Image: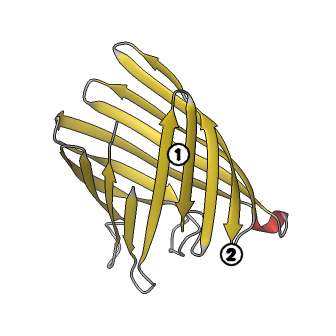
Amino acid sequence: MLYSYFIPDERDYLQPTVAADRGVLHLETRANYEGLGVGSAWAGWNFAWCKAVTLELTPMFGGVFGDTKGVAAGGRGRFNWDFIEASSESEYVFDATGKADWFYYNWSQVLLSPAEWWYAGLVAQRTRAYKGERDIQRGFLVGFILGPVDITAHMFNPDDARPTYVLSVSVGRK
């Protein structure tokens, strides 16, 4: 997955994530996720309960390196029922420089998919990769699925004079 961040009055940047699942094992690596100039590598365990309703949970543990060094505990969860999906990804970074630099990150969204090829919803994030006037950024998203490719446009803080935009592209969305 590749996220492109377009931030008013700051440097735009890319945030790539590569994930692989083999059975219940989940492996993931990221750049510019915990902060600019920061990378991380993760391992986790997938749990899923699927009937008419799908619930997926993946607790993870990772190492953080680059401008921030330390370890992190986190996870993701996804709930899906018919055309409604809610998901959240969180982590807590324990920075090796000291407790004052520990931080919590979250990305959450709620989606409605009226058709198999598009969806829209609400999104919120708490990040340290860039500075904003708000501790929690919130906004809207719309996405399109073209075969194995998923393209999503996000607008954070739409009531600001200059909102933040994020464009994401992924291959092989669940």
Left or right of 172? Residue 65 is: right
At x 49%, y 22%, the residue is 48
Q: Which mark is residue 67?
A: 2
Q: Which residue is mark 1?
A: 89
Q: Is the C terminus in the top left, top right, bottom left or bottom right quadrant? A: top left
Label 2 neighbour load within 10 Å: few <14, some 14-19, many 20+: few
Q: Nearer the viewer, mark 2 or mark 1?
A: 2
SS of the residue under disc 2: loop
Label 1 neighbour load within 10 Å: few <14, some 14-19, many 20+: some
Residue furthest top in the image: 51
Labels 2 and 1: the sequence-earlier one: 2
SS of the residue under disc 1: strand
Q: Does 15 sit above or below residue 170?
A: below
At x 85%, y 67%, the residue is 98
The x, y position of residue 102, in whole percent, is 75, 61
Mark 2 vs mark 1, CA separation in Å: 22 Å
At x 69%, y 66%, the residue is 65
